[in-house]
């Protein structure tokens, strides 16, 4: 589960994320991390979660949008050999 409070923080910006957005982020994170050995290590999960939080704060809240962001983050991890 993503550790996101009702107010996700970004330097100088306070954005409230809806419960639906947070639920979508959790679903996408879990689905994406299933592709990593043992569901991903802490650093990999955190990297993907941070990307999802940034995307949600920018207004991307659907499963499709978040899925694209998560897959891109996963591709970065795999490209680095992680």
Image (cartoon, rainbow, N blue to C red):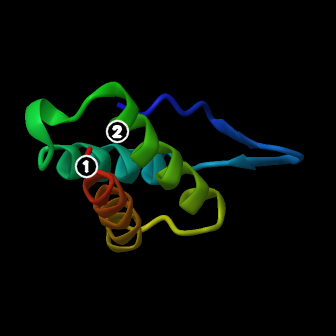
Q: Quadrant of residue 47?
A: top left
- The dot on residue 70 is none
**Image check: 33 left or right of 26?**
left
Q: CA distance from mark 2 to mark 1?
A: 11 Å
| The one of 52 and 63 positioned closer to us in this rendering | 52
**Tag 1 secondary structure:** loop
Can you say whether 66 is above or below 25 in the image? below
The quarter of the picture where the N terminus appears is top left
Q: Quadrant of residue 11?
A: top right
In this view, the residue farthest toward the right is: 12
In this view, the residue farthest toward the front is: 81
**Residue 35 coordinates in the image, percent (x, y):** 12, 50
**Residue 17 coordinates in the image, percent (x, y):** 60, 49
| The one of 56 and 19 positioned closer to us in this rendering | 56
Task: State the residue at coordinates (30%, 56%).
Answer: 74
**Residue 67 coordinates in the image, percent (x, y):** 32, 65
Task: Tally the numbered discs.
Answer: 2
| The one of 75 and 46 positioned closer to us in this rendering | 75
- Mark 2 sits on what residue? 44
Earlier sequence position, callout 2 versus callout 1: 2
Task: State the residue at coordinates (48%, 64%).
Answer: 61
Label 2 crowd (10 A; few <14 / some 14-19 / many >=20): some
Q: Which is closer to the viewer, label 2 or label 1?
A: 1
**Tag 2 secondary structure:** helix
**Image check: 34 left or right of 47?**
left
Label 1 crowd (10 A; few <14 / some 14-19 / many >=20): few
Can you say whether 56 is above or below 62 in the image? above
Task: State the residue at coordinates (55%, 49%).
Answer: 53
**Image check: 33 left or right of 19?**
left
- The dot on residue 81 is 1
């Amino acid at each position: 589960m993503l550790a996101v409070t009702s107010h996700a923080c970004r330097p100088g910006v306070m954005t409230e994320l809806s419960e639906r957005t947070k639920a979508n982020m959790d679903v996408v994170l879990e689905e994406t991390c299933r592709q990593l050995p043992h569901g991903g290590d802490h650093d990999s999960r955190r990297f993907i979660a941070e990307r999802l939080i940034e995307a949600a704060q920018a207004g991307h809240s659907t499963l499709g949008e978040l899925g694209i962001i998560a897959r891109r983050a996963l591709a970065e991890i795999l490209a680095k050999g992680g």
